[in-house]
Image: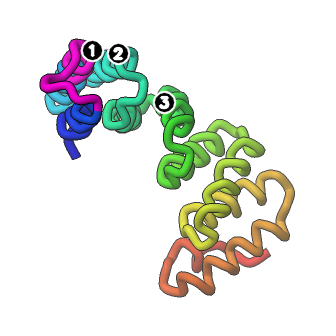
Amino acid sequence: MTAIPVLMAAVSLFGAESPKPHIKAALAAYEAGRAAEREKQFQRAVDSFHRAIEIEPTFLEAHERLIKVSLDAGQRLEAAACITRFLEIQPTAVRYRNTLGTILLEQKQTERALAQFSLVLQRDPFNADGLLGFAAAARESGMKDRAAEAIERGRKRYPLDERFKNIPRP
């Protein structure tokens, strides 16, 4: 999905015939970020997406591109911060909650990871990545019974998913 139709639709809701200057500026920064991303100039892309978000804080596509570029550049902590801001706008974005939970686990922030995976499973009780992440976080937190429950739920729901098969039973 491109950002231009989404922002243009927002402008048309307010009866404007052409985009307001700040929308044009946000779109220009976004397009500069996309160009930098295509050229693998990650820092320039990050800067451009940040500028687009600064101009228009609810510019969802700019947030998502910023997350992707940060992950592509190996800046996982920056990506986690971007995801956290994105989730303030889109709290039901399960994919990003799973990613944030995974990064938090990598950073040994087990309780925070557990909270993210719990939110995923509240929204989608059989989300495979959520179940695996929850199990890993629960195991790290010493809740081996809760980890085993999540793995069993995953094994029953996804009998062909190798990720659930390869986890030893407690």
Position of residue 144 in the picture relative to residue 103 (left or right): right
Q: Quadrant of residue 68?
A: top left
- In the picture shown, does residue 85 fall above or below 136? above
Q: Are marks 3 and 1 in contact (CB under 8 Å)?
A: no
**Which label's residue is closer to the chain start, 3 or 1?**
1
Residue 73 appears anywhere in the view: no
Across and down, in percent, residue 47 comes to: 32, 16
Q: CA distance from mark 2 to mark 1?
A: 6 Å
Q: Position of residue 58 (x, y in %)?
A: 41, 29
Q: Is residue 136 above or below residue 18?
A: below
Neighbor class of circle 1 (other Cα within 10 Å; few <14, some 14-19, many 20+) is: few
Which residue position is annotated with label 1?
22
What label does residue 82 carry, if any? Answer: 3
> Which mark's residue is nearer the viewer, 3 or 1?
1
**Residue count near mark 3 (Cα–Cα under 10 Å), binned few <14, some 14–19, many ≥20:** many
Front-lying residue, 30 or 22: 22
Chosen colour scheme: rainbow
Q: Amino acid at mark 2?
A: Ile
- Which one is in front in this view, the residue at disc 2 or the one at disc 1? 1
Is the residue 81 above or below the residue 136 in the image?
Answer: above
Q: Quadrant of the C terminus?
A: bottom right
Identify the residue position indicated by label 2 in the image: 55
- The amino acid on which the numbered mark 3 sits, given as a three-letter code, is Cys
Magenta-colored span = 14-27
- Pointer 2 and pointer 1: residues touching (CB < 8 Å)? yes
Q: How many marks?
A: 3
> Residue 145 — which label?
none
Identified at 33% across, 15% down, the residue is 51
Image quadrant assignment for residue 41 = top left
Residue 23 counted in the magenta span: yes
Marks 3/2: CA distance? 16 Å
Instruction: Say which amino acid is labelled 1.
Output: His
